[in-house]
Amino acid sequence: MSNKQLPHLVLGGELVDLHRSEFKDLSKVDIVGLFPDYASAYAAWKAKAQSTVDNAHMRYFIVHLHRLLDPGETAA
């Protein structure tokens, strides 16, 4: 198991259009949290996505921050 830090951000909100990733109101974006690995980010994403299943325009995303911080890195 790798001890390398791979931060992931989970966020979501209501989208303008289901075919684009544009939020209806950026001031209402739900920042779920910052997670140390993909597995914990996925668990948080799944819980939030399932809790908003009644709103078809609500979407949650996992942002791979480690890829933004070190774009040359090929880690998962």
Image (spheres, rainbow, N blue to C red):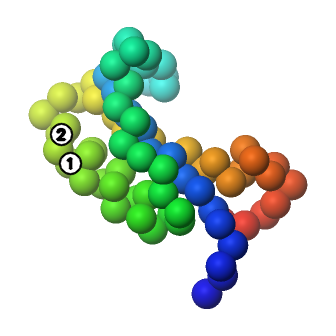
Q: Amino acid at mark 1?
A: Gln
Q: Residue at x 40, y 59 (%)?
A: 42
Q: Of the numbered discs in the image, which one, if any, rests on residue 50? A: 1
Rendered image quadrant of residue 1: bottom right
Residue at the farthest left position: 54
Whole-percent x, y for residue 71 in the image: 81, 49
Nearer to the camera, 34 or 75:
34
Badge 1: residue crowd in 10 Å (few <14, some 14–19, many ≥20): few
Q: Residue at x 33, y 55 (%)?
A: 44
Q: How many marks?
A: 2
Whether pointer 1 and pointer 2 mark residues with C-beta atoms closer than 8 Å, the reply is yes
Q: Report whether residue 31 is seen.
A: yes
Residue 54 lies left or right of residue 43; in this view the side is left
Residue at the farthest bottom position: 1
Q: Of the numbered discs in the image, which one, if any, rests on residue 53? A: 2
Residue 62, placed above or below residue 39: above
Whole-percent x, y for residue 34 in the image: 48, 50
Q: Of the numbered discs in the image, which one, if any, rests on residue 40? A: none
Residue at the farthest right position: 72
Give the distance between the C-alpha atoms of the residues marked 1 and 2, in whole angstroms.
5 Å
Badge 2: residue crowd in 10 Å (few <14, some 14–19, many ≥20): few
Residue 67, placed above or below residue 16: below
Whole-percent x, y for residue 40 in the image: 42, 65
Residue 59 lies left or right of residue 67; in this view the side is left
Q: Amino acid at mark 2?
A: Val
Rendered image quadrant of residue 53: top left
**Which part of the image, by quadrant, shows the C terminus?**
bottom right
Residue 55 lies left or right of residue 32; in this view the side is left
